[in-house]
Amino acid sequence: MKKFLEEFKTFALKGNVVDMAVGVIIGAAFQGIVNSLTNDILNPLLGIAFSTDFSNVVIPLPNGADPLCVGSFISAVINFVIMAFVLFCLVKAMNRLRDFGRRKPAPAAKAEPEKPAAPTQEELLAAILAELRAQNAAEAAAQEQEPALTQ
């Protein structure tokens, strides 16, 4: 029995269950407001067309059967639509707040790849000197081969 009570305590105190309970209580309290809106404001305004309170609009059935309470049903549908819309707005707002807390920092602007460092003057001069030496060596080798070809 003790293990059962521990499991129940763990279940009952989970965040989701507590959140759901709070939602049910708030929803029930808000339902009273929506019922008052429908019964005290919307039904009398809609009832102007029927010369009676809209929730009292009925369709009589033949053979003495109970009439269809169309007005009462439509009032319940109006209550449902209002409650669904309000709950949708609440859930959307809560999700937005939750996501606001979880937002990732904006990605840093991508840095342009580093350009290779320009060669220094010494490196350029060394490259020029190496090229000149290579050209001079090629000219010297060509001159040595010319007399051999002419003989």
Image: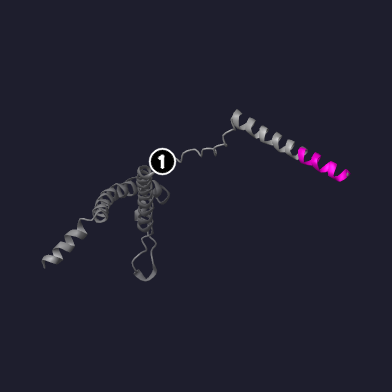
49 inside magenta stretch: no
- Pinpoint residue 93: horizontal percent, then vertical percent: 37, 45
- Pinpoint residue 44: horizontal percent, then vertical percent: 36, 47
- Pinpoint residue 102: horizontal percent, then vertical percent: 36, 45
Residue type highlighted by circle 1: Pro
Q: Quadrant of residue 103?
A: top left
Q: Is residue 66 above or below residue 13?
A: below
> Which segment did they paint magenta?
140-150
Q: Quadrant of the C terminus?
A: top right
Front-most of residues 8 and 112: 112
Q: Quadrant of residue 113?
A: top right
In the rendered image, the residue lying farthest to the top is 121
- Per the image, the residue denoted by label 1 is 105
Front-most of residues 51 and 88: 88
Question: Is residue 123 rendered to the left or right of residue 68?
Answer: right
Front-most of residues 123 and 40: 123
In the rendered image, the residue lying farthest to the right is 150
- Pinpoint residue 7: horizontal percent, then vertical percent: 18, 63
144 inside magenta stretch: yes
Q: Is residue 6 above or below residue 42?
A: below
Q: Is residue 130 above or below residue 86?
A: above
Question: Is residue 124 rendered to the left or right of residue 36?
Answer: right
Question: Is residue 62 rendered to the left or right of residue 33?
Answer: right
Residue in the picture at 56% in, 34% down: 117
Q: Quadrant of the N terminus?
A: bottom left
